[in-house]
Amino acid sequence: MSTNENNNPAFEAVPEEPVFYRLQFRQGGQHFTGAGFFPGLLAGTVVMVRTDHGIEPARIVGYSPICGCRGEKGQASFEIDRLAKGVELEKFVNLAESEEVAFQDCNSLIEKHKLAMHLVRVERFFNGSKMIFYFTADNRVDFRALVKDLVQEFRTRVEMRQVGVRHETKMIGGVGTCGRELCCSSFIKEFDSVSIKMAKEQDLPLNPTKISGVCNRLLCCLTYEYDTYKKQRKNMPKAGKRIKVDGEQFLVKRQVPLQDAIVAENSAGEDVLLKKDQWTSFQTMVKENPEKKRDRKKGRHGSSPRENK
């Protein structure tokens, strides 16, 4: 470090590593990670963030854990460019109000054109160059006349974007059955495929009301522990198999992955819990060779029809 840098307090104020914050572009919206060389920003501070379509304002929610491992460059969803100025702060406050007005106007036009669609959210770019109207619909909708009216009303580019029920729930938000904020509206960026197989693997009740979320689709959290259950079950004897442990035969009834144990029926017809130190040395009862089974069957019923010929 040079002498000028040592004597200049401005250099000391700028950290050598970026500081990570949690950002929020809309009130009640999803949190994102932003990084910038601005230490000590308080919650509620409005900053200007670089996005794919230009500079957008966002509000600091709090600090975020440093992304990436030690020695690796941290990863953040957005880069904090600078603090918002006075005019930008005023425009940011009015942005939510203008989006609400656009939402109401669009709903009125939807009723006017008698379109079978449900408006979910309106987003307006900070520079005013574009507006995106998110909606859901059961079928394809001819909204050309609607777009024409919206362009005349707001004098900017208009995009109609149809989303599914999962994305609709992500935008609206809510509270799940666990009592916490919905995962999709709080931190999930992209939806993973969820299947009923994941619920079966975790021994969950296959009741739609138990394993479905607010969107009436399978819970996103079914994917969280699926790989762990799958890994735990991999080397465990499967249900329906007959095994031999320390010379005694058992019929496996079910697996208990979280305890590394299995429930099995012994020769007396009793269900017992075999822990990992017991079943790790199990031997699978070998099934009878099909050829021997056919030979035994021929010996019981006489020679085969081919031999009779």
Image: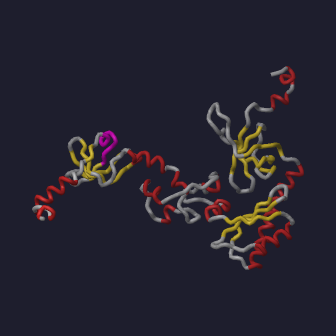
**Figure disc tally:** 0
Q: Where residue 258 sits: x, y (%)?
A: 41, 47
Q: Where residue 255 sits: x, y (%)?
A: 36, 51
Q: Quadrant of the C terminus?
A: bottom left
Q: Residue at x 73, y 36 (%)?
A: 18
In this picture, residue 229 sits left or right of residue 100: left
In this picture, residue 260 sits left or right of residue 50: left
* Residue 20 position by quadrant: top right
Q: Where residue 68 sits: x, y (%)?
A: 63, 37
> Looking at the image, which is closer to me, 93 or 109?
109
* Residue 201 position by quadrant: bottom left
Q: Residue furthest top?
A: 3
On whether residue 53 falls in the magenta region, the answer is no
Q: Is residue 159 above or below residue 65?
A: below
Q: Is residue 4 above or below residue 289?
A: above
Q: Which residues are magenta?
A: 273-280
In this picture, residue 49 sits left or right of residue 163: right
Q: Residue at x 34, y 51 (%)?
A: 238
Q: Quadrant of the N terminus?
A: top right
> Looking at the image, which is closer to me, 177 or 287?
287
Q: Where residue 290 sits: x, y (%)?
A: 22, 54
